[in-house]
């Protein structure tokens, strides 16, 4: 199964090779969705973890035990249907083509599964119809 | 040859054949121009796109004692008051000077700067209440110095859109060849040709189907913001002499129209305030034009397809009036979502809504079929010979 997690690294654990340990010790494939990591600074990482459900839970426990902040409530992009005018301006800045116009109806369609929550669409929307629930 | 009077008779007796521009194009492909001409009386076009050269005229009604307003703010957005005592013009792109929230000592919220005249217009059309603050010039005729109140569309005399430049006949495609993000009236343009944005709905767009403005004129009744409106003049920067393809469509921005309509009868669905980050406020507007099928030439022009209409790709990273172009692309390529610029594949998006543009055409078609909308005879043609001058004077 897959789990999306928000990780916060205190300065002391920024040096730890987390994705390597996840793969080696828990057999978990960690797909980095967003990251902000620099030496001696608090780091942020959004990962999509895929692996066995028990291994996932064990990995999350292990990360918490190592002072890594784990949050499972990752933001999702939300489109307000009432406000959207279906211009499609957001589709041009979406790096994963999760936002597209239906070729027949020209209505905006959003595929949550492929969205990496980069949030580029939010300031692009001229009618402020896009937000995150973070 | 048919006349508008004949078509109107058919509309009122429920016998008119009315098609949207998309239906018309499909029929021409099947039947050819001659046979299609025999079948159809009216073609409905529509678009929904940002048209920033728009605004509303408001007449408040007089206060007691009366007042000559010289400065005025509606929900914090300044409106022009340099004419009759309580006449105002609220421009779509005017940005708010302040927020009423601020009066209560709250911190200046960031979203206030993202509100403009277009949002106030939308709110009034939606039936919402708007604050007004006014400062007057005290005279013997108008002794009052200031006024604060709330208004709605119902509590003022006139509230109509008067838009100096709407419905561009074709436009450009914006890209950014520089190395930093640019915030433009086409939305954010990502560096190193990161995206491209166009703003016309191509072959569905009203004026691209009547390239020489032969089916319309001053006085033509139209769909404007969900109500009946009118073409009242050429638009500002009207440039019918733009270079054209053999099918008569222009290769860049060309004709424009000045439009008027009663905002009290409009609906929020078709009049939307919008804001482009770090650029400003603009008005997204639904406009529909019915073409009377008077002759075969009108059908021929309306049969134009996206493949045969082009727009120039313009680099916004050069901050000059004339920006370098990467050449022309056609609307079939643009609507496909990818174009090639100098060997690089670039994602393209539109700032105009094909979904709502189609809905405008369908709504106008329904009005005509229901006998609620008849066609009007133009009182004068739109000029065909306007040049496009620039300010090149040397100080």
Image: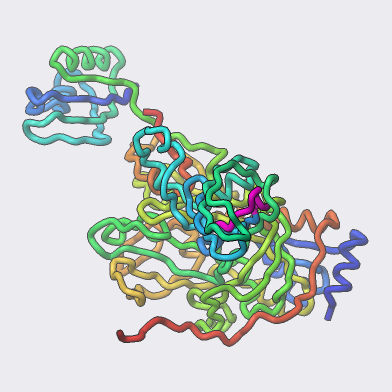
- How far from the left and from the top, in percent, is residue B260? 66, 64
Quarter that holds the N terminus of chain B: bottom right
Q: Quadrant of residue B154?
A: top right
Viewer-side residue, B6 vs A59:
B6
Does B52 sit left or right of A63 as displayed? right
* Residue B219 drawn at (x, y percent): 73, 72
Up-down relation of residue B325 to residue B124 (above or below): below
Q: Residue at x 88, y 73 (%)?
A: B6
Q: Does residue A55 sit above or below B182 in this rendering? A: above
Q: Nearer the viewer, residue B128 or B329?
A: B128
Task: Check if residue B246 falls in the magenta segment.
Answer: no
Judge whether residue A106 can be spotted in this image.
Answer: no
Q: Is residue A26 above or below residue B339?
A: above
In-front residue for pair B322/B280: B280
Q: Tell me residue B362's x, y (percent).
A: 71, 55
Magenta: main secondary structure: loop
Q: In the picture provided, is A124 more to the left or to the right than A103?
A: left
- The quarter in which the C terminus of chain B is drawn is bottom left
One can see residue B325 in this view: yes
Rendered image quadrant of residue B39: bottom right
Q: How is the image coloured?
A: rainbow
- Residue positioned 83% across, 74% down in the render: B4
| Span colored in magenta | B60-69
Residue at left 47%, top 47%?
B76
Q: Front-most of B57 and B175?
A: B57
Residue at point 24%, 57% (across, down): B180
What is the x, y in percent for residue B242?
51, 82
């Amino acid at each position: 199964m897959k789990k999306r997690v928000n990780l916060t690294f205190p300065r002391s654990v920024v040096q730890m090779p987390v994705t390597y340990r996840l793969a080696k010790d828990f057999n978990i494939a960690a797909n980095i969705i967003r990251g902000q990591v620099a030496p001696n600074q608090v780091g942020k990482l959004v990962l999509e973890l895929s692996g066995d459900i028990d291994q996932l839970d064990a990995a999350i426990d292990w990360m918490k035990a190592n002072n890594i902040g784990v949050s499972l409530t990752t933001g999702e992009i939300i489109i307000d249907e009432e406000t959207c005018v279906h211009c499609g301006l957001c589709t041009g800045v979406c790096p994963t083509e999760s936002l597209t116009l239906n070729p027949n109806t020209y209505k905006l369609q959003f595929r949550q599964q492929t969205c990496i929550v980069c949030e580029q669409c939010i300031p692009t929307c001229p009618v402020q119809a896009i937000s995150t629930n973070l | 040859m048919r006349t508008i009077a004949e078509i109107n008779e058919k509309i009122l007796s429920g016998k008119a054949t009315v098609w949207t521009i998309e239906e018309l194009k499909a029929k021409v492909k099947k039947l050819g121009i001659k046979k299609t001409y025999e079948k159809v009386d009216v073609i409905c076009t529509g678009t929904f796109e940002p048209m920033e050269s728009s605004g509303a005229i408001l007449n408040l009604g007089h206060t007691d004692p009366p007042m000559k307003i010289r400065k005025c703010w509606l929900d914090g957005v300044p409106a022009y008051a340099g004419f009759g005592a309580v006449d105002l013009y609220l421009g779509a792109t005017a940005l708010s000077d302040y927020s009423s929230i601020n009066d209560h000592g709250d911190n200046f919220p960031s979203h206030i700067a993202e509100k403009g005249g277009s949002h106030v217009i939308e709110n009034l059309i939606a039936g919402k209440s708007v604050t007004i603050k006014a400062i007057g010039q005290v005279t013997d005729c108008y002794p009052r110095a200031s006024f604060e109140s709330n208004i709605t569309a119902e509590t003022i005399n006139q509230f109509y859109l008067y838009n100096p430049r709407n419905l561009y006949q074709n436009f450009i495609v914006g890209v950014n060849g520089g190395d930093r993000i640019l915030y433009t009236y086409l939305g954010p343009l990502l560096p190193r040709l990161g995206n491209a944005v166009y703003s016309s709905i191509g072959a569905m767009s009203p004026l691209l189907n009547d390239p020489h403005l032969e089916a319309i004129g001053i006085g033509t009744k139209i769909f404007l913001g969900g109500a009946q409106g009118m073409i009242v003049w050429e638009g500002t920067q009207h440039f019918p002499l733009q270079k054209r393809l053999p099918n008569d469509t222009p290769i860049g921005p060309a004709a424009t129209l000045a439009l008027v309509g009663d905002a009290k009868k409009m609906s929020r669905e078709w009049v939307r305030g919008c804001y482009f980050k770090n650029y400003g406020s603009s008005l997204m507007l639904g406009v529909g034009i019915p073409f009377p099928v008077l002759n075969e030439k009108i059908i021929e022009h309306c049969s134009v397809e996206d493949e045969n209409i082009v727009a120039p790709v313009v680099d916004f990273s050069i901050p000059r009036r004339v920006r370098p172009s990467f050449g022309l692309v056609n609307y079939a390529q643009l609507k496909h979502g990818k174009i090639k610029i100098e060997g690089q594949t670039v994602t393209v998006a539109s700032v105009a809504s094909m979904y709502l543009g189609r809905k405008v055409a369908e709504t106008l078609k329904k009005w005509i079929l229901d006998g609620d909308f008849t066609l009007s005879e133009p009182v004068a043609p739109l000029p065909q010979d306007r040049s496009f001058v620039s300010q090149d004077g040397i100080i």
